[in-house]
Image (cartoon, rainbow, N blue to C red):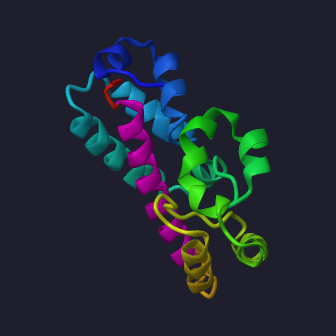
Amino acid sequence: MSLTLAQFNDFNQAQATSTLLTCCTSSRWAREVASARPFTTLEALSAHSDTIWGKVQQQESDLLEALDGHPQIGNVATLKEKYRNTQDSAAHEQSGANEAEDEVLEALAQGNQEYLDKFGFIFIVFATGKSAQQMLDLLLARLPNDRATELVNAATEQNKITRLRLNKLFKPAV
């Protein structure tokens, strides 16, 4: 889907919120960004998104809701089954995991489970442009952190992903 800002600005609140949920599954973020329409530029929308995200990430339940909208890195079955509303925007984001060697994928799966067990939420990383090995290296580097540090890391990575998805959503159709 590709929209113009004018089309988005004309949506009713429910349509705008639903559209934004394809970029980030925090209902608070989506509602608050949708409520701030109209936006005259993508830059203004992105800036407002950042401001709202700064508030949302302060509330752990809102942050965890956003993180729940992601499959585990490399888990394509989860992507297709659980996250249908973000499937189109997320599928290529993990393309580096699609070409990985089996042992790297197995290590990612094991590391993801250890991360989930330790922190109570999935490992999230801005995966675009990263190989499976790079994602594994980042996961292993972050695994020793404490939960508070990882909540901050996850919030930062989520915002990068949200910005990418907003840019793709409003990219002019060619």
On screen, residue 83 above or below 101: above
Q: Does residue 73 appear in the picture of this structure?
A: no
Q: Position of residue 36 (x, y in %)?
A: 32, 28
Q: Residue furthest bottom?
A: 144
Q: 36 or 166, which lies in front? A: 166
> Please, what is the dominant secondary structure of the magenta stretch?
helix
Quadrant of the image occupied by residue 118: bottom right
Left or right: 139 with respect to 162?
A: right
Q: 53 or 157, which lies in front? A: 157
Residue 157 on the magenta span = yes
Left or right: 86 with respect to 102?
A: left
Q: Looking at the image, which residue is at 63% across and 67% down?
A: 123
Q: 174 or 162, which lies in front? A: 174
Residue 88 on the magenta span = no
Q: Position of residue 40 (x, y in %)?
A: 20, 25
Across the whole image, how many numbered discs are drawn on residues? 0
Q: Looking at the image, which residue is at 53% across and 64% down?
A: 125
Q: Looking at the image, which residue is at 67% across and 68% down?
A: 100
Q: Which residues are magenta?
A: 148-170
On screen, residue 27 above or below 145: above
On screen, residue 39 above or below 100: above
Left or right: 6 with respect to 68?
A: left
Q: Looking at the image, which residue is at 69% across and 63% down?
A: 121
Q: 161 or 88, which lies in front? A: 88
The image quadrant where one finds the C terminus is: top left
Q: Position of residue 159 (x, y in %)?
A: 43, 54
Q: Position of residue 68 (x, y in %)?
A: 67, 51
Q: Does residue 26 appear in the picture of this structure?
A: yes
